[in-house]
Each structure stands twice: as C-alpha cells, then as structure tokens.
C-alpha cells in the first residue's frame, strides 16, 4: 500500500536522551547498591520506566515496595537532564522537511511520559510539525507491544499499512512490525552490526542517510 504517514519514536532517535535516561536509571539503582553494565542497560532500552524498574528490581532482588518511588525519581532526573543538556540527533530538521515536502501526516509514538514529550518538542522546535502524538505512559502494555503505534495511527486517522516508522530500539522495532507498519531502524552505533535488526525494513546509521532512493525502496 502507498505510504502517506510517518511516525517517529523520540528518545535516542530525535534527541540524544538515552545517555540521560541511562544516567538517571543507574544513579537510582546505585541507591540500592545495584550497578548495570552498558550491555545490560541496552537489554531494556525502549521499555517504560515502570517496566525498566520492575525488570531490574527483580534481577537484583530489590524490594518492590521501593519501585514506585524509584520510578518517579528516574523520570524526574531524566527530564531535568534532557531539558538542560539534551541535543537534537543529526538530521532531525532534514527528516521532518523530507516528509513535510511529501505532504505526509507526521506522528510521534513514544514510551516516555507526556511531560517529557512537551519538553522535547519545544526544545527541538518541532511542535508545529507534528500532527499527533501518542504516549504509552498510561497504557496497559508498552513497546514491544504495538498499542502506542496503533493509537498514534488512529489519532492521525490513517491505516497502519500506510505508515512508515523510525525507531532506534529493538523493542520499538518489534512494536512497529507488530502494528503492520514499515520500519526504519537507526540503532546505537555500537549495536549496528547485530543481526537482530534484520527484522526491520531498512537499517541506517543516521537520519541523514534516509534519501529518495530509500523512500522508493520502501514504497
């Protein structure tokens, strides 16, 4: 089916927020004498903070009575860090212009809370370029469940089969494919050569690599 809509993930794709989520998460776990390796951290990239905390609390056998407070601490720390130090990923202006010139509907689908969406869209200056956004903050399931992408398509009033999505995480990629949408994945550079990205329709190193040839290939 012809593509007429693009939906973007946010963290790690449009803004370099992952290092700050990582800092916030690791700082919070350290309060419980738990330390993550970088490889361990990548294992849960793309999860909501709630699932992230539950996963690592179980892994390190931390009492879940402290989970809700830890979740709130991570979100607060991450928003503060991203708001003050976050920078746009290379090619953000380019990729929005690319699809606006094609008259595409533009959406945002993220596991992050709405409070962070508000900070990021203003920081990047893209609020007026986004037609609709969807957050998995209050959903029963988040990525890799496809609901946040299905919700975004519904708000955009488009068929999921007409959607092209950009993601940077494995959980996000699975969510996109489960929603029956086309997926371009732009993983962290140190994970680029992993075979798990083969499920995507296209894997690139940066947004700037997406060009007319890539668009025709996916169309």
Image: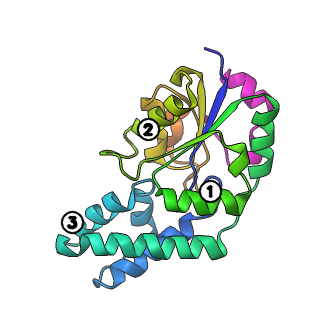
The residue depicted at 40 percent of the width and 45 percent of the height is 143
Q: Is residue 62 visible?
A: no
Q: CA distance from mark 1 to mark 2?
A: 21 Å
Which residue is at the front of the view, 31 or 126? 126
Quadrant location of residue 100?
A: top right
Which residue is at the front of the view, 169 or 145? 145
Measuring from the top left, give residue 185's x and y in whole percent: 59, 42
The residue depicted at 47 percent of the width and 42 percent of the height is 196
Q: Earlier in the sequence, mark 2 or mark 3?
A: 3
Q: Earlier in the sequence, mark 3 or mark 1?
A: 3
Q: CA distance from mark 3 to mark 1?
A: 29 Å
Crowd tier of the residue under label 1, counting other residues whose Cα lies within 10 Å: few below 14, some 14–19, many 20 or above? few
Q: Which residue is mark 1?
A: 189
Q: Which residue is mark 3?
A: 58
The residue depicted at 55 percent of the width and 69 percent of the height is 19
Q: Residue furthest top?
A: 1
Crowd tier of the residue under label 2, counting other residues whose Cα lies within 10 Å: few below 14, some 14–19, many 20 or above? many
The residue depicted at 56 percent of the width and 47 percent of the height is 9
Crowd tier of the residue under label 3, counting other residues whose Cα lies within 10 Å: few below 14, some 14–19, many 20 or above? few
Measuring from the top left, give residue 141's x and y in whole percent: 32, 45
Disc 2 secondary structure class:
helix
Mark whose residue sits in front, 1 or 2: 2
User: Image height check: is 39 above or below 107?
Assistant: below
Q: Which residue is mark 2?
A: 175
């Amino acid at each position: 089916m012809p593509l007429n809509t693009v939906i973007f993930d946010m963290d790690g794709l449009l803004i370099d927020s992952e290092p700050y989520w990582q800092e916030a998460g690791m700082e919070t776990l350290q309060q419980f004498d738990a330390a993550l390796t970088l490889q361990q951290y990548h294992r849960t990239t793309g999860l909501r903070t709630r699932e992230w905390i539950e996963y690592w609390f179980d892994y390190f056998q931390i009492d879940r009575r402290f989970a809700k407070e830890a979740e709130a601490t991570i979100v607060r720390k991450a928003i503060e860090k991203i708001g003050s130090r976050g920078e746009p990923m290379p090619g953000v202006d380019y990729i929005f212009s690319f699809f606006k010139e094609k008259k595409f509907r533009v959406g945002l689908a993220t596991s992050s809370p709405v409070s962070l969406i508000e900070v990021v869209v203003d920081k990047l200056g893209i609020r007026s370029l986004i037609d609709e956004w969807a957050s998995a903050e209050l959903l029963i399931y988040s990525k890799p469940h496809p609901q946040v992408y299905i919700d975004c398509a519904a708000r955009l009033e488009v068929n999921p089969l007409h959607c092209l999505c950009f993601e940077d995480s494995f959980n996000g990629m699975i969510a996109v494919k489960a929603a029956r949408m086309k997926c371009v994945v732009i993983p962290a550079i140190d994970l680029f050569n992993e075979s798990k990205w083969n499920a995507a329709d296209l894997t690139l190193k940066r947004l700037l690599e997406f060009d007319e040839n890539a668009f025709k290939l996916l169309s």
